Image: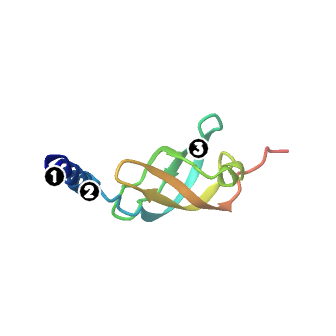
Amino acid sequence: MRYKTCFVILLCTLALFSCKKSSPARQYAMHGQILALSPQDHMATIKHEKIGDWMEAMTMEYPIKNEADFKKLAVGDRIDATVFVNDSSYYVGNIQVVGKAAGPAK
């Protein structure tokens, strides 16, 4: 019985120490323009300015988690948004359209 108790305590201790606390998401302001939208996977190709100390100016795809944020976007829109960065993932949220895409010429 004593060995079982020690074994259970050892397993619990190992479990507690092996649990890694996930760090809170870092947040960065983003300013850019929507170049393409993929409704199937909620991805937006965004040409953006430098993003804080996280990324240089470039064009790349970003996931948009919030359905309402994704639905208000159109190709050509200029946006201000927040990039949320975790240890192994990133996504764009808090999107504000600051310049609408030009409509078709008449």
- The amino acid type found where label 2 is placed reads Leu
Would residue 17 be found to the left or right of residue 100 on screen? Answer: left
Q: Residues within 10 Å of mark 3 (few under 14, many from 20)?
A: some
Q: Residue 98: percent from the left, percent from the top?
A: 65, 64
- The amino acid type found where label 3 is placed reads Leu
State the residue in front, 73 or 84: 84
In three-dimensional space, the C-alpha distance between marks 3 and 1, rounded to whole angstroms, equals 60 Å
Task: Kindly indicate the quadrant of the structure image that contains residue 28.
Answer: bottom left
- The amino acid type found where label 1 is placed reads Cys
Residue hosting label 2: 16
Q: Residues within 10 Å of mark 2 (few under 14, many from 20)?
A: few
Would residue 26 be found to the left or right of residue 37 on screen? Answer: left
Viewer-nearest of discs 3 and 1: 1
In three-dimensional space, the C-alpha distance between marks 2 and 3, rounded to whole angstroms, equals 46 Å
N-terminal of the pair, mark 2 or mark 3, is 2
Residue hosting label 3: 35
Q: Residue at x 53, y 46 (%)?
A: 63
Viewer-nearest of discs 2 and 3: 2
N-terminal of the pair, mark 3 or mark 1, is 1
Q: Residue 83: percent from the left, percent from the top?
A: 48, 58
Q: Residue 42: percent from the left, percent from the top?
A: 60, 41
State the residue in front, 59 or 41: 41
Instruction: Give the secondary structure at mark 1.
Output: helix
Would residue 29 be found to the left or right of residue 65 on screen? Answer: left
For the residues bearing labels 2 and 1, Cβ distance under 8 angstroms: no
For the residues bearing labels 2 and 3, Cβ distance under 8 angstroms: no
Quarter holding the C terminus?
A: top right
Q: Residue at x 25, y 53 (%)?
A: 12
Residue hosting label 1: 6
Instruction: Give the secondary structure at mark 2.
Output: helix
Q: Residue 90: percent from the left, percent from the top?
A: 44, 51
Instruction: Give the secondary structure at mark 3.
Output: strand
